[in-house]
Amino acid sequence: MYNYLGDNVFLIFVIFIIIVFIFIIMFTRSKNSTVSPSVYGSSSDVVNSKKLNVLLLDDNLMNLKVNSRILSKFNVSIDCVSTFEECFSKVTSGIKYDLILLDYLIPEHNGVDMLNSLKKIDSSLRVVAMHNENNSAQVMSVGFDGYLVKPLKENDVFEIINNIK
């Protein structure tokens, strides 16, 4: 009887150690998957000292949610819109945007037309195109200030945001 009880206690202890080990691995992986100052330098390096205003335009609501979650890891204020008309309205409302992330293909509009319309309002606007394909040379040649491949990656977003001075 004593050995039986001792074996069960040992087995429970081993299971407990395994569970703790798994928990530590899961916690470490989830912690490393976010952008933190330790990954990209000091917190002042992650984004400029002022809070940036970012306008995010994507017709896919799931993309808006995912991309805004990625952007929220940086020192930015995010406005999300799903149509070019909403984007145009926000830009003409008097809000000064430091960056506009623009889905390159929106139904009934294309990225070049949207870029030209936005630049007519304010030629100093920084507009970055987002697209599912990597055709950055073509997109950059028409005047976009940057290019991001969807789905967005934190390190790519970091580089775009950190270059805004």
Image (spheres, rainbow, N blue to C red):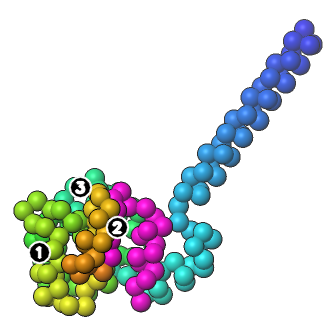
- Nearer to the camera, 164 or 36: 164
Reading the image, the residue beneath label 3 is 61
At x 22% / y 55%, what residue is drawn?
60
Q: Residue 162: x, y in percent?
A: 45, 80
Reading the image, the residue beneath label 2 is 148
Q: What amino acid is found at the position of numbered circle 1 in the picture?
A: Asp
At x 25% / y 91%, what residue is drawn?
124
Which mark, residue 68?
Answer: none
Tell how many labels: 3
**Left or right of 35: which side holds 60?**
left
- Nearer to the camera, 137 or 112: 137
**Left or right of 153: which side holds 102?**
left
Specify which label sits upstream in the sequence, 3 or 1: 3
Q: Looking at the rendering, which quadrant does residue 164 occupy?
A: bottom left
Reading the image, the residue beneath label 1 is 113
Q: CA distance from mark 3 to mark 1?
A: 22 Å
Q: Residues within 10 Å of mark 2 (few under 14, many from 20)?
A: many
> In the rendered view, would you say 39 is above or below 93?
above
Dot 2: element? strand
Dot 1: element? helix
Q: Residues within 10 Å of mark 3 (few under 14, many from 20)?
A: few
Q: CA distance from mark 2 to mark 1?
A: 18 Å
Residue 141 highlighted magenta (yes or no): no
Specify which label sits upstream in the sequence, 2 or 3: 3
- Range of residues picked out in magenta: 146-165
Q: What amino acid is found at the position of numbered circle 2 in the picture?
A: Leu
Q: Residue 163: x, y in percent?
A: 43, 83
Residue 128 shows in the view: no
> In the rendered view, would you say 120 is above or below 60?
below
At x 77% / y 25%, what residue is drawn?
12
Q: Residue 150: x, y in percent?
A: 33, 59
